[in-house]
Image (spheres, rainbow, N blue to C red):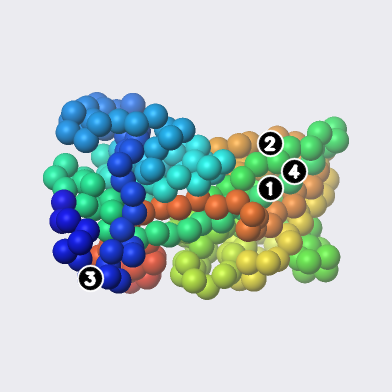
């Protein structure tokens, strides 16, 4: 690792403390073997006292790790030991402390889902990718959409609908033909899933300050579930979604492969 005193003053200011590294790995053989090699070289601190968490696996395990860090916002540096690895850096054993010290921050704020079931039970959950509403049975869902207290769509007949974060806009949202949103745009994609009526509605881009309310119509006949990343609530009557700026998590990326660049590049993938 390059001694800090040999770096320019501006670069020194960007270095972070990496004395205590916690290494977490997905339960796959590749991730576990990679973890054993890193721990042997760089040690392994407890999660609760670590300066940084190194996450080994794929995007799914990265998302799980980010949720785990939400209460204390310890930065997470992912290294790909999975398949796609959109949220991960390349796996390299050498110079890990130096890579961590020089990595760039990406701060994410989650969506907060406030769901009320048909029996009156209230459930809350956070989502770093998206909050999605999905039909539970063969019948299409009927959903009223209200934005900031104003009804914008009295009745959407569909398989479902979702609100994504900018970071999550390249995940389920993109698969549902929603727009990719740059991290700096302060926008939330609102995207229908297999809309039947109105057939031509393709969704909307909302300001990140928007309060979105979904009301389920004919819920007894057309039950709907709501999913915030890993948390599913079934038989919902209404679901409120908004960005929670009081909660944050920090991802770390190698300077030449930041998340903003990846999101831009994804729009030119053919």
Q: How crowded is mark 4: few (under 14 residues within 10 Å), some or many (20 or more)?
A: many
Which numbered disc, 4 or 3, marks the residue that appears first in the sequence? 3
Q: Name the residue under label 4.
A: 115
Q: Which residue is drawn at 51% across and 56% down?
A: 108
Instruction: Report the side of 241 relative to 98 (left or right).
Output: right
| Mark 4–mark 2 CB contact (< 8 Å) | yes
Which numbered disc, 4 or 2, marks the residue that appears first in the sequence? 4
How many marks do you count on the picture? 4
| Mark 1–mark 4 CB contact (< 8 Å) | yes
Whole-angstrom CA distance, mark 1 to mark 4, is 6 Å
Q: Would you place residue 67 above or below residue 154 in this image? A: above
Whole-angstrom CA distance, mark 2 to mark 1, is 10 Å
Q: Which residue is drawn at 59% across and 65% down?
A: 188
- Quarter of the image holding residue 143? bottom right
Whole-angstrom CA distance, mark 3 to mark 2, is 52 Å
Of the two numbered discs 2 and 1 in the rendering, the one whose residue sits closer to the viewer: 1
Q: Which of 247 and 12 is in front in this view?
A: 12
Q: Which residue lies furthest to the right in this view?
A: 120
Q: Residue at x 70, y 41 (%)?
A: 124
Q: Mark 1 points at which residue?
A: 113
x, y percent for residue 248:
55, 52
Whole-angstrom CA distance, mark 4 to mark 3, is 51 Å
Which numbered disc, 2 or 1, marks the residue that appears first in the sequence? 1
Q: Which residue is drawn at 46% across and 70% down?
A: 182
Q: Name the residue under label 3.
A: 8
Q: Name the residue under label 2.
A: 233
x, y percent for residue 97:
23, 47
Q: Which of 161 and 252 is in front in this view?
A: 252
Secondary structure type for disc 1? strand
Whole-angstrom CA distance, mark 3 to mark 1, is 45 Å
């Amino acid at each position: 690792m390059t001694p800090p005193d040999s770096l320019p003053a501006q670069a020194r200011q960007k270095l972070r403390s990496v004395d205590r590294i916690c290494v977490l790995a997905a339960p796959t053989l590749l991730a576990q073997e990679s973890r054993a090699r890193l721990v042997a070289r760089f040690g392994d601190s407890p999660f609760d006292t670590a300066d940084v968490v190194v996450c080994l696996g794929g995007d799914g395990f990265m998302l799980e790790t980010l949720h785990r860090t939400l209460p204390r916002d310890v930065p997470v540096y992912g290294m790909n030991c999975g398949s796609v690895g959109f949220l991960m850096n390349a796996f390299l054993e050498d110079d890990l402390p130096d890579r961590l010290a020089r990595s760039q921050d990406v701060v994410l704020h989650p969506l907060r889902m406030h769901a009320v079931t048909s029996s009156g039970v209230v459930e809350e959950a956070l989502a770093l990718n998206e909050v999605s509403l999905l039909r539970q049975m063969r019948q299409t869902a009927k959903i009223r959409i209200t934005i900031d207290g104003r009804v914008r769509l009295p009745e959407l007949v569909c398989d479902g609908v979702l609100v994504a974060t900018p970071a999550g806009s390249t995940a389920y949202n993109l698969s549902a033909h929603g727009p990719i949103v740059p991290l700096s745009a302060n926008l939330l994609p609102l995207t229908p899933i297999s809309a039947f009526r109105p057939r031509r509605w393709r969704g909307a881009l909302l300001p990140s300050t928007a309060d979105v309310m979904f009301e389920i119509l004919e819920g007894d006949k057309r039950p709907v579930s709501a999913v915030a990343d890993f948390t599913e609530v079934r038989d919902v009557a209404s679901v409120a979604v908004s960005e929670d700026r009081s909660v944050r998590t920090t991802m770390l990326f190698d300077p030449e492969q930041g998340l903003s660049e990846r999101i831009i590049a994804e729009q030119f993938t053919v």
